[in-house]
Image (spheres, rainbow, N blue to C red):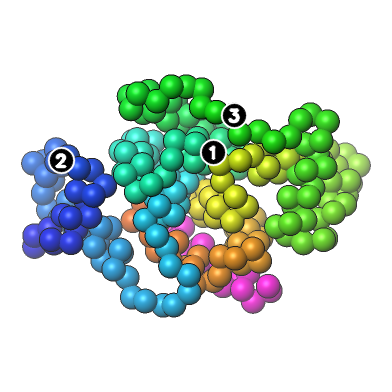
Amino acid sequence: MAISEFAKKYHEKMFPGYSSSFLETDPEFIELFDNFAFDEVINMPDIGGKEVDGRTRHMAILAALLGCQGIDEFKAMLPAAMNFGVTPVEIKEITYQAVAYLGIGRVFPFLKAVNEFLKSKGITLPLEGQATTTSENRREAGTQAQVDIFGEGMKDFWKSGPEESRHINLWLAGNCFGDYYTRKGLDYVERELITFCLLAAQGGCEPQLTSHAAANMKIGSDRLFLIKIISHCLPFIGYPRSLNALTCVNKAAEIA
């Protein structure tokens, strides 16, 4: 087996002039992986639905690598993402949003990696601020984001549930949606896709993944598009979590 010409060209587009040391130490593995991830997956059968462009693919991969805690591969894919049009602001927003779904304990090293990468590219930090809310209006803005994405049933969600845990629903509105989803840099469709990838790669979040799969479909990312996203992320997160994500997508499509 040899690395296909398509895989070589795609790899060169991601990493111009770069040759992996694994070509010397693990040539058979690199042939297997590159031919699969950078040829067979890219040229998957046409199933219809909205297309996944290179920029979107790499945004999804970055989110999936955050979700599965693939810090070394995340660092490796940062330049590829930028070469496919993902901007520094978008990279930052993907990383920031991950905190709401993974927690700072798991995102901290990724944020450090992003900062080191951007500095290495001569990009001055901090980047331009993207916040659109204040401490006074974040809950209301977050509730509106929930309604825009999930529907009118979320209007009073922030004050629902048992008294002893109601504050968590308040935090979901004010923090998760009010602090993050209202930021500039990514729109609702992109943020929901990022959330889908974070949850799919994390695993163990199938109820939330099903809910966010349905939300994706509601605001413009159809079932076939989500299947394509899962397919593009599969080489980076493996089959079990990809198959679980597929089950969640199909379940969400049934109840949508």
Label 2 element class: loop
Amino acid at dot 2: Gly
- In the rendered image, which quarter is residue 62 located in? top left
Observer-side mark, 2 or 3, equals: 3
Cα distance between the residues tagged 2 and 3? 34 Å
Q: Is residue 229 above or below residue 158?
A: below
Amino acid at dot 3: Gly
Label 1 or label 2, whichever comes before in sequence order: 2
Cα distance between the residues tagged 1 and 2? 28 Å
For the residues bearing labels 3 and 1, Cβ distance under 8 angstroms:
no
Residue for badge 3: 129
* Image: magenta residue range: 240-256
For the residues bearing labels 1 and 2, Cβ distance under 8 angstroms:
no
Q: What x and y, as percent, mark residue 59?
A: 44, 49
Residue for badge 1: 93
Amino acid at dot 1: Glu
Q: What x and y, as percent, mark residue 129?
A: 59, 29
Observer-side mark, 3 or 1, equals: 3
Residue for badge 2: 17
Label 3 or label 1, whichever comes before in sequence order: 1
Q: Nearer the viewer, residue 164 or 144?
A: 144
Q: What x and y, as percent, mark residue 241?
A: 46, 57
Q: Kindly give the residue lying farthest to the front in the view shown.
A: 128
